Image (tube, coloured by chain):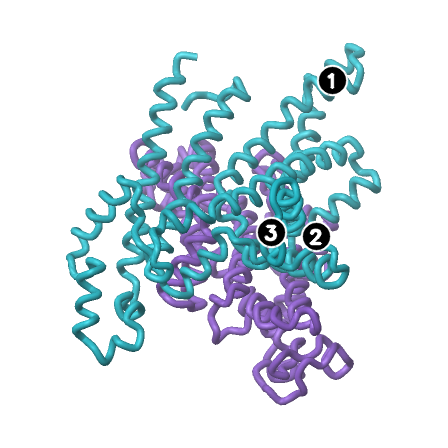
Chain colours: A cyan, B purple
Amino acid sequence: MDGIGPYLLRRGIQTILTIFLIIILNFFIINFAPGDPVRVIAGEFAFSNPEYVENLRKRWGLDKPITERLIIYLTNLMKGDMGFSFRYMQKVSQIIGERILATLLLTFTSLILSFILGVSLGVYSARRHGKTIDISLSFIMLLLYSMPVFWLGILLMLFFSVHLKLFPIAGMFSSRVSYTGFMLVLDVLWHMFLPVLTLTLANLPIYYKITKASVLEQSNEDYVRTFKAYGLRRDKVFKKYILRNAILPPVTIFGLQLGFVLSGAALVEIIYGWPGMGRLLLDAAFYRDYPLLMGLYLVTAVSVALANFLTDITYMFLDPRVKLT
Amino acid sequence: MRTFGNRILSKVKSPALVQFWRIYSRDKLGMLGLLILSGITLLSLLAPYLPLKDPFAIVYRRFLPPSFEHPLGTDHLGRDVFSRVIWGSRTSLVIGFIAAGISALIGTTLGSIAGYYGGLIDDILTRIIDIFLMIPAFFLILFIIAVYGSNIIYVMIVIGLLTWPSNARIMRAQVLSIREREFVQAAILMGVSNIKVLIKHIIPNAIHPVIANSILQAAGAIIIEAGISYLGLGDPNAVSWGRIIYEGQSYITSYWWISFFPGVAIAITVLSLYLVGETLSKIFNPKSMALGG
């Protein structure tokens, strides 16, 4: 395996280059936007008090030429400073930092659940290919795949929270009581049930479909027929050989989805009032809070780039056939 | 549907199309998808001529439940939900197909250039494709719409601009293999210009998987638009399914029908596109060779 070092280096450089391009893109989208952020901050004073507007412009550095602002932006980013939110009057990095864990809690839980469930159901279906249970499962997955995730979320909330009153409608904690310790954990689990269910159901069909197709494809390979001809037990061939090869495609999907742990749950978070990054994004979009918008987009884009890099490395160890190109 | 298709094809004298239809019409799920999709398309095309109530008219009583007069009830302003859902199909279908069209156009062009010319051009284009694949599309679209204002044209263009890389990848792989075939090599040796070889000989023989992928992408675009409209960031001047859900969600606990039915419409449309797209990609898959390449 002499290619690992250079391979890692090349992929690393590529990742950094991607992140750099995303930052530049980010900066220009905002800067060519119509509308004047200073007028938004100034509110009603914008028309009555031009001096105040000029002061604001100076204070936020918006009077400098675009190239200078780009350089300031880049140097600040290097220091970990993503700017200051007009609306929250707080550092962007601080606001995002407060929300990021709530989002990760939702997305990681549902990502792992949908991987395990989707792969198991896919394997189950493939081993009963063509039977009623396989056809019904495929049909359900097709339906889940076709539904928009936010609509599924609304339906689940309507049924479980409004109709059956089993789960809370919104939020992450119960508002009237302040639990500690184990009760707090239970409280959060109770609140995250529906959002996690929605996300899991939405992601399930991809894993199901890929796993099923991949198990079926492997089962038709020559090596499987040879093993069977040699009299190896079906179960043993399945566990030792088919599954090992068939698991690679769903792992790839898992890696791809890992990149979307920050952005993938936005709609579901908004429906369930989850205090994560989704709501923040929507508010930032509505109030044109540019530094916050840029920060959010940057953080998500960087997470995608990093996840891709990690997936490539993992894959290299999982599948010895991967060519280091 | 099958005989109807056969009748049309008997007038068009194209053996390739006839053969394609023979294979496609054997697939039951594919036919179901095509049937639903044709139905929806027909409804959306004919919407102005159908005896529908005015989707914008605020003339009925508010929150009427589904009845014979209003099959899907009325909304918070007293508009007929049924006619809004039918009119909404126009917005959703247009967004789906135009976004997918833009994506197919860019993907095909760049993918075939990368595959045909190879070398440095290929390297650069492949890197660009890799970078585009890393952009979280939904976030960026939200971002752009928030900054530049909401307009149905922006939504379509941005979705198209962000989703072309998968088409480019497919096209590149196709062109790489077709470039080596004898008829292409012969054309090159005969001195036919590069652009002519690409447009006349390679692209027509390579584009089929891109068509299948584009239909799946149309479904994706419809879902993205619905999500944006659901957040209230859609074009306020267009009736779209996502927008109807957005408007109805504040009343959903008592008047569920407003948000429920547009969601059903999205699911059915996406399902039909998915069934057609999957059937096409099964047929056009270079591995299966169902159409002889």
Q: Are marks 2 and 3 on the same chain?
A: yes
Does residue B254 lie above or below B13 as drawn? below
- The residue mark sitting in front, 2 or 3, is 3
> Up-down: is B62 above or below A11?
below
Question: At label 3, which amino acid type do we have?
Answer: Ser
Kind of residue indicated by mark 2: Leu
Image quarter (top left, top right, bottom left or bottom right) of the N terminus of chain B = bottom right
Question: Residue A312 location, x and y as percent?
Answer: 46, 28
Q: Are marks 1 and 2 on the same chain?
A: yes
Marked residue nearer the N-terminal end (2 or 3) = 2
**Which residue has dot 3 on it?**
A178
Disc 1 chain ID:
A
**Residue at (74% x, 44% y) in the render:** A138
Chain that bears disc 3: A
Q: Does residue B283 appear anywhere in the picture? A: no
The residues tagged by marks 2 and 3 sit, at their Cα atoms, a distance apart of 40 Å
Residue, disc 2: A143
The residue that disc 1 covers is A237
Q: Is residue A194 visible?
A: yes
